[in-house]
Amino acid sequence: SNAYLFVDWLAGAGQTYWQVLPLGEIGPGNSPYMSSSAFAGNVLIIDLFDLAHQGWLSQEDLIPLPEFRHDRVDYGLQKQFRVERLHRAAKQFFAGGNEAMHSAYSEFCMAQHEWLRDYALFKTISEQQEGRNWNQWPTALANREVEALRRLEVEYVEQINFWKFCQWCFARQWEQLKQYANERGVQLIGDVPIFVAYQSADVWAHPELFELDQSGYPIAVAGVPPDYFSATGQLWGNPLYRWDVHEQTSYAWWVQRLRHALRSFDRVRIDHFRGFAAYWAVPANENTAVNGRWLPGPGAKLFDAFKKAFVDLPIIAEDLGVITPDVAELRDNFELPGMRILQFAFAEDNSNHFLPHNYIANTIAYTGTHDNDTMLGWWNTASEKEKSFVRQYFGREVIDVPWDMMGALSGSVANTVIFPMQDVLCLSGEDRMNLPGSSDGNWEWRFTWDQVQPWQTVKLSKMTSMNARS
C-alpha cells in the first residue's frame, strides 16, 4: 500500500521520523481534531485490499474502484464506498470459521474494553438517532441507563459488532505498519488533540469529566484568543474538562488515553500544550473566541501522573500561540521538547526565538505545521520587509525558498527537524493542509507519487547526512 511505500521512501531518503495528523475519525469540516472518540481509529484508512487478502472481500468488491481523485480526498465518496465494503467484510468475517482470527478479535475486544464498548454503542445509537447530539437522544440512552443499553446490545448486536470489527482491523493494520516502519529505522510520531468533540463517545460515556450543565450542554467551550491566524481568535467549540474531577481519579482517563497513543506511536505531539497550564474558556453562546478568559489547567499534577504511569515521556509539547512563563516552566520541568516554526521567524528582529540561531537542542523544528501555508506559499504572500529580513539572515538572495529553509533548520542545533511533504515537493499555497478559521477545503490534500522526483530524494538524503542527522 502507499503507506508502506512511503516508509520505504523515508528510509531511502535517510529519514528517521514520520509525523502524522490525529488518526481518529474525522468530525465537522473533515477535521481530525473533532473526532467521535479519543481512542478509535479512522475506519476510512483501513486497507480494503488487506481484507480481501484475508478472504473477507472478493475481487468484485474492489475492482473496478470508483474514480477517486489522487491529489485530494473526497470524503463523501470515500465514506460511501469504504463503509459499505467494511460491512461486507464484517459479515463475511463473522460468518467464517477462521478460529485464529476470531480469537484475535475476541482478545482485542477484551483488551480494549475500557473504551471499545462505549464507542460501538455510541456509533450505533448515533446512526439510529440520525446524528442528533447525544443529549437529544431518548432519556434512557442519553443517561446510559443499564437496561436500555442492554436491550440495545441485543437488538443491534450486528451493528455494534461491526464497529468493533472495524476498530480491530484498524489496530491490526496499524500495528503491522508500525512494526514495518520501526524495522526500517523509521519512528512514528502521532498527534494527540488536547480536547475532544462534544458529540463523542468520551463525553457521552463520561459526562462527569466535562463542564456540562444539567441538560448535558457545554457551559463553556475551547478556543484561543486573537492571534497570528485570526483577528477574532479561533472558536473550536470543544467542551472543557472538569480538571478537579480528573484529579480525584488520579487522571485515569488521561493516563489511559496516553497509554493508548503510545501503543500506536513511538512519540506523540500533544496539541495545544499551553492548555495544561491555562486554557481559553469561551461562553458557549458566543460566536467568536474574543470574549473568553484564561482559566488554570492541571499543570504539573497531570504530568506527575504520567511520570508515575510511564517509564519515560516521549511527548512533544506543541507550545505555540500565547506562551506565558508558566507554560515554559511546565514544559521545561518535565524536560519536554518544544516546537519552533520557521515561518514565524522573520516578522521581527534577530531576537525572535523562532530563528534557528536562537534554538536550543531540546527542540523540534518545523518549516511549518498543518496550520501554516506551505513554505513557497508563505514566501509568495510575505511582505517585502519579511523577504528583506530573510535575505539579510541568509546573507544572499534566496533562490529555492523551501529547500533553503529546510537547510537552515537541518543545520540548526534542534535535535529533530520535521519537514511537511509539501515543502519537500516545493508546492504552493494551494496545497496547504488547513486554513484556521475556514471550514471548506481543509484536510483534503494528498501527494501523488509522480510528484516525487529522484532528485528530491537524493537532495533530502544528502542534506540529512551532511548535517549528521541520519
Image (cartoon, rainbow, N blue to C red):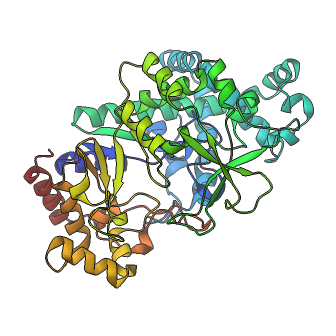
Vertical comparison of 201 with 399: above or below:
above
Relative to residue 396, is residue 265 depicted above or below?
above
Say if 251 sits above or below 381 in the image. above
- Location of residue 401 in the rendering, given as x and y in whole percent from the top left corner: 25, 73
Decide if residue 250 is on the left or right side of residue 423: right
Badge count? 0
Question: Which residue is nearer to you in this view: 8 or 423?
Answer: 423
Q: Which of the 4 image quarters holds residue 262?
A: top left
| Relative side of 153 to 418, left or right | right
Residue 225: x and y in percent read 60, 58
Question: Above or below — where is 428 with respect to 136?
Answer: below
Q: Position of residue 284 (x, y in %)?
A: 77, 51
Give 69 or 207, whichever is nearer the viewer. 207
Please indicate whether residue 43 sits to the left or right of residue 456 in the image.
right
Residue at image coords 29%, 70%: 426
Foreground: 198 or 15?
A: 198
Q: Position of residue 139 (x, y in %)?
A: 91, 32
Seen as rendered, the residue at the extreme left is 466
- The answer to whether any part of residue 46 appears in the image is no
The quarter in which the C terminus is drawn is top left
Residue 326 in view, yes or no = yes
> Nearest the camera: 384 or 446?
384
